[in-house]
Every structure is written in structure tokens, then in C-alpha cells.
Image: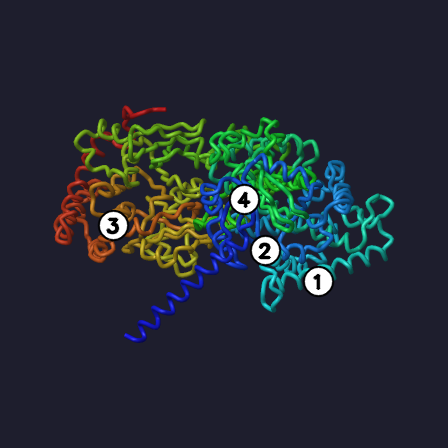
Amino acid sequence: MAVFMVVVLCFLCLLCICSALLRWNEVRYRKKGLPPGTMGWPVFGETTEFLKQGPNFMKNQRARYGSFFKSHILGCPTVVSMDPEVNRYILMNEAKGLVPGYPQSMLDILGKCNIAAVHGSTHKYMRGALLALINPTMIRDQILPKIDEFMRSHLTGWDNQVINIQEKTKEMALLSSLKQIAGIESSSITPAFKTEFFKLVLGTISLPIDLPGTNYCRGFQARKNIVSMLEKLIEERRASKEVYQDMLGCLLRSDENKNKLSDEEIIDMVVTILYSGYETVSTTSMMAVKYLHDHPKVLEELRKEHLAIREKKNPEDPIDWNDLKSMKFTRAVIFETSRLATIVNGVLRKTTQDMELNGYLIPKGWRIYVYTREINYDSFLYPEPLTFNPWRWLDRSLESSTFFFIFGGGTRLCPGKELGIAEISTFLHYFVTRYRWEEVGGDKLMKFPRVEAPNGLHLRSFLNLIKSKAGLFTVANLNLSLLLGEFEPFSFTFKPRTPTPLLTDELDIVIPTIRNLDFLEMWRPFLQPYHLIIVQDGDPTKTIKVPDGFDYELYNRNDINRILGPRSSCISFKDSACRCFGYMVSKKKYIFTIDDDCFVATDPSGKPVNALEQHIKNILSPSTPFFFNTLYDPFRDGADFVRGYPFSLREGVPTAVSHGLWLNIPDYDAPTQLVKPLERNTRFVDAVLTIPKGTLFPMCGMNLAFDRDLIGPAMYFGLMGDGQPIGRYDDMWAGWCTKVITDHLGLGVKTGLPYIYHSKASNPFVNLRKEYKGIFWQEEIIPFFQSAVLPKDCTTVQACYIELSKQVKEKLSKVDPYFDKLADAMVTWIEAWDELNPNGPGAKLANGKAK
């Protein structure tokens, strides 16, 4: 009891001390004429709340005290201004005692001569020296060619890779600036410089505590090391008689530089250029890629603009000043990205004297935080402010708006604005013309106090297909066009020299979907010549958009009910198993089925994989199910039967099924997904093999082809999805049934090539709910199929399937009554198949919605 009382007493004492400290700090700053607000704790003030809550802290304070209030953040008493009129006045009136007020750590590490720290006449001539380096003429004649050369090199080799675009854009911003500043010498100092520069950046945004191990201490030491490297470089330049056409060369040539700088000023100027461009260019580039990914129409418009530029050029031609000026939509994307992401939340000013502002008295030495973030979301200036809408910026008057603060204002308007736009525009030019991409990993973004992805922003990039007069190639391999002829953006009209696709009149492509089929754009060069059968799952009133130029017919649930009548009960609802309806209504000999989250993969050489062509090769060549060939498929080019393979079996058997594989997101069950959430398949195994007779396999329906004449009626994907106790076993059920029947009828099943790129990982918890019973049931199902024997008088697929349904009812219904229902559905499926195909696969059906 005594101990408890002591603890309570200590707690009460601590509470009283804290209350007293808060009260004392409020009284301390309660001077006449100050704006309303709170000051928080002594020393620390409200910095913790500000950094944790960010914009919400500002909104809450504004709700309590208005748009002009006092606080204690970032280590000093501060007045926060969220009033656009007041902010404009502050930015435009540096001469009236409002000078830059950046944190001490930033001033120490960037140097006392950096342009953000100086003011008055010093700022004027430092700014003049900087503008001499990056004016429009310099960008046109000297800087843009260097940027173009760098971007071409930097964006090479990203195909079929998972990249951290945050890391890539940071590296891009730094190395591009180094190339502009130090020219060819950048390569010699780059490795050591990069390491020290990243330490310097972290030091500028840390508390100025000079103790070993702190970011400030490491950043300050990094500055010393960078200064040493730059001093050595300057010394070497002066000792050399060579004329260097880069920024450093310009700064060192006194005859060209009327704003002559000391070595200390030159070094601080170089550090300033690197630092200011690094944060804004890298973050804006990363967020532009993010927004483009999330807004396909914007990406389409942007890519159209850049492909139009490339159309007029030879592949090896760089972009020039006129190209840059023509990138009007690109400029709009950059502005909209900067606005919506709010790369810069505001700027700091410091009073050099007691002054009156907005009706309040601001003491000398106080900071004023010109908080411009909220103006970016003002619905009066930007209708629908939370919408990413670059088109709003095509009205150039918005750039000259009174409250356009994205790049600062007054004498502190960002001098590198146009240079930064040139760098980002060039980056986007090569990125969107060379690559398409998908996000992987579901990375989290933070937008305060800095815009960043704490764990990186990971993308899977793959080559963007381009068409020349001689055929298909990729933008990343543009040198091919020198051999093939004039280059043009990939269009959807096939030229005479394009090889004729195989089996165009004998093959249907079946796609189950609940969404618009934008993914077909990437498949267009391979799939457009074929007929598509689209089976729409879910709400039949929803309109599914299919890209122009594709020949297709679309069936929804209403069509299925109309065509099959009572037998429509065998077709699953709210599940990809509905795809098997497409197999039933097809009138072609072959079927290729693919999911709408699967894209064109690339092989290890970077060449796009024509999955359908490989499937056709697999199906048209024999299988070898009775004796395993250790060189895999002996019918592939460059392979044959190995020594010891029986000659009597070398003729092989007809191939009924070609089972393809996937890169990126693996086809895992839910427990494995949960254990390995970030695992990706990056291995491209160049092999095809026949699955031996008597061996089952887990068939995946997302990349599958089969001979409909040989095995079509067995490709029933069962009862899954809505109203059923199990899901995600539809393709596997079809695979097990098919394998038993192909073994019985002497047919073959191949697996391996081709690969597709699987882009989206499904929710493992949702999958676990669907699979839960199946995980246990399959321990009974697999032995059932392994022991299943079909009578010799079953000589057709239909007869085999009906017999298999009887055995399912007899043996598996003991596991769960569901299998009794499934067995009946298997019979219904065959009845429906035979009704729609009374004379075999060649019979004609009045289809549903022919498009």
C-alpha cells in the first residue's frame, strides 16, 4: 500500500511539474501584440506534434486561432502564416526585414555562402552568378545535351526488373547534376561523392547536436569531405590548360563571369545546386511516375506527346530545345505533380527587427513559416483540388497566378525552375517511351514532413513495344531501327512485312473479367489478329471497355442464362471459373485463355515473349508421356531424344494441353503467400517438358492453351465462387480431371514455356477464406485422382468425364456433400456442351453479344 501511495504521489508531482512548465512557457511568450496560439514545452515547443501530425496540426491550429498564429517549432519561436495574401507580402518584401530563416543545421552544412543563407547585395551577385550558369541559352546549348546523354544511359537495363524508383530517381538527380557541373570528371569522383552527399542531406534535416554518431555530426563531416574533393578538383582544373564546357569551368573563368566568386563561394554554389536539385527533381520524378501509374489516361496522353517527338527523329537523335518547348503536357504533369504531392510545404523567413505584420507585432529574431501547402488544395484556384488533373495547367495563366507559390516567389523565386523542368521532362521522355510498369509490394508513401516512401517505391518495368516498318522491337533497343528502316511509334495497323500469325482462323482467346481490358494494349501485336471471347463475371449491367481494333464477342451472366437455360447452374458466378463458358461456345479447334492481370513477359535477352506463339508450337508438336526425356521436349529446336530413349516411343502422342508459367507474382496458395508475401519469381527457365503419365499437376488457368477437339469437354472449371464452400480450385480441378482423361486416352500435357508476367498479388486473407476447406479436402482429392481408373469402353472425352463424375459422387461425396453437387454439375456441363456442339466443334452457334 505504501509503495502504491509513493507511485501515485510521484505521478501527481510529475503532472504538476509538467503543467507548471507548460504554463511557464505560455507566460514567457505572452507578449503584447503577438498572434494567438500555443508554445508547447520549453526548448522542444510543439515540434513533436508538428512533425507527427503535419498538415493536421496546422489545420487544427488554424481552426482554433485563425490563419496567422504563433507556435514553437523547429527549435525556435515561430509565427505560422497560412494566409495567401500575407504569404505573398512576405515573399515579395525581403528588403523590409524578412530574410531567409532556415534551420541552423542546414546553414552549417550547406555553407555560409549558399544562396539560401545570404541576403542583400551578397544574394544579388550570388544569384546573378547562378543564373549565368542556368539561363535558357546555357540550358539549350550546353546543359540539355548533357542531360539527354545521361538519361539515355541511366534508363538502360531496367527491363524485366523490379526497381526502387525512389532510389533510381535520387541517383538520377545527383549524377545528372554532377555531369552538368563537373562534366567527364564526374565519373572519377562519383562513388565517394555519392556516399558523402547522402550523409550531407540527412544532416541538413537533423537537430544541430554536434555529438559523434548524430546525423548532424556525420553530415558536417560529409561536408568537409565534399569540400576537400571539390578543392582538389578546382586545383586540377586551374593547373590544366584545357577549357571545360561545364558549370565549374564557367565559374572558374573570370573573363566569362562578371559575378566573380571566391573559391569558398564557388564550392558553396556547387553544393547548393546539387542539394536543391536533388530533393526536388528526384521526388517530383518519383511522384510523377506514381501518379502516371494511377491515372492511365494521363499516361496515355503523356506517352502520345513523347512518341510524337520520337516519330520525327532517328532513334539515336537526342531531344533538343524545340522538343523541350513542345512538351506542353509534360510541363503540366510536372506542375500538377508538384502541386498535389506538395514537394515543398513552405519556406522560412526570419525577422531582422521588431516589425508589424498582419496587425500583430513580431519580435526580432522570430521565424515566420510561410506555409504554402494549403494553397495547393484551394478549390477556388484549383477546382477538384484532390484530383490529379494536369490538363488544368494547359491554361498558362495559372502559372502567373498571384498565389502560384510552387516555386517560391519574389527575389527568392527558384532560379533552377526551368533546369529542373528540363531534367524531369527528359527523364519522363525516356521512361514512358521505353517502359511500361506496374507497382509491386504495395509500398507506403509519406507526404510529411518530406515526400518519401520509407521502404522504397518498387516497380516492375518491362519494355514498351514499338513498331517499325520492318516489325516489332523495343524502344530500349532503338539501334535496331537503323537496320530495319524508318522508326515510327507503335501503331495498331499491321504492316505487310509482319509475319502472319499462326492459326488465326482456328483459335479463340478466352478472357474472364470484371474490369476494362486495358491490359490488351500491351498484347495487341500478338493477340489482335485473333478472335476474343470475353466472359464477364459479376454485375451484368456494367459496361466492359475493350480497346479499339479487337474482334470479340462478350457474354455476361444474362447471356449465359439465356443460352443455357436451366443448365446455366453449372457455370460458376463471381469466380474466374466462369471462363469455361467461353470454351463451350467457341467454334474453333484451339483455345488460349489468359487472365486480365497478365502482361507480356521478356526473356533474359530483353525480347518480348509471344506467349501464344509458343503455346501453338507446344500443341502442334507431339508429347512424350510414356518415357521421360532428360533433355526435356525433344521436339524443340536444338533438342532431340537422348541415348537410351526407346525408338518405339519416339513418335510421341498428340498434345492436348500446353500449360504456361509466370514471372513476378507466383501462383501460391494462401498459407505460402502469408509466409512469403514479397517473394517474386524472376527465374526464366528455357524449357518445355511433358508431364509423365500417371503424374498429376496443379494446373493454373491464367496462361493456358489446349486443343478443344481433343480435350475440350474435360475443361470444366467446376462449381466455385458465389454460393459455394470453396474457391481458387477451379483450374486445378479441371487439371486433375483432364490429366486422368489424357492419360486414359493416350494424349499429352506439356508445361514450361511460355512465360507471362503476372502483375497483381491477390489478398492472402481473402484467399485463405476461399481455400480453407480445399486445403484439407485435397488430401482426399489427390489420392482419389491418383487411383481413378476409367473403363476401356470410355473412348470419348464425354464418356470419360461422365464416368469420372460417377466416381466423384461415389467416393468424394463422403468427404463433403458439396462433391455430390459437383458431380451433378459435371453431368450438366457435358449435357450443355453436347447441346451447343451437337455435331462437334465445327457446329455454328448464334452467339451472345457479337461486337
Q: Which badge, 4 or 1, comes first in the chain's sequence?
A: 4
Q: Which residue is mark 1?
A: 224
Tell which tag, 3 or 2, sits nearer the viewer.
2
Q: How far is the residue under mark 3 from the one under mark 1?
A: 73 Å
Residue 484 falls in image quadrant: top right
Q: Say if 18 sits above or below 85 in the image.
A: below
Q: SS of the residue at dot 2?
A: loop
Q: Which badge, 2 or 1, comes first in the chain's sequence?
A: 2
**Contact, mark 4 vs mark 1 (Cβ under 8 Å):** no
Q: Which badge, 3 or 4, comes first in the chain's sequence?
A: 4
**Can residue 773 be seen from the camera position used here?**
yes
Q: Position of residue 409 (x, y in %)?
A: 65, 38
In front: 597, or 177?
A: 177
Q: Which residue is mark 3?
A: 740
Q: Which residue is mark 2?
A: 205
Indicate the amino acid at tag 3: Val
Q: Say if 694 sits above or below 795 in the image.
A: below
Indicate the amino acid at tag 2: Ile
Q: Which residue is mark 4?
A: 35
**Contact, mark 3 vs mark 4 (Cβ under 8 Å):** no
Q: Say if 176 sits above or below 93 in the image.
A: below
In front: 261, or 822?
A: 261
Q: Which badge, 3 or 2, comes first in the chain's sequence?
A: 2
Q: Position of residue 83 (x, y in %)?
A: 55, 37
Indicate the amino acid at tag 1: Lys
Q: Position of residue 696 (x, y in %)?
A: 29, 54
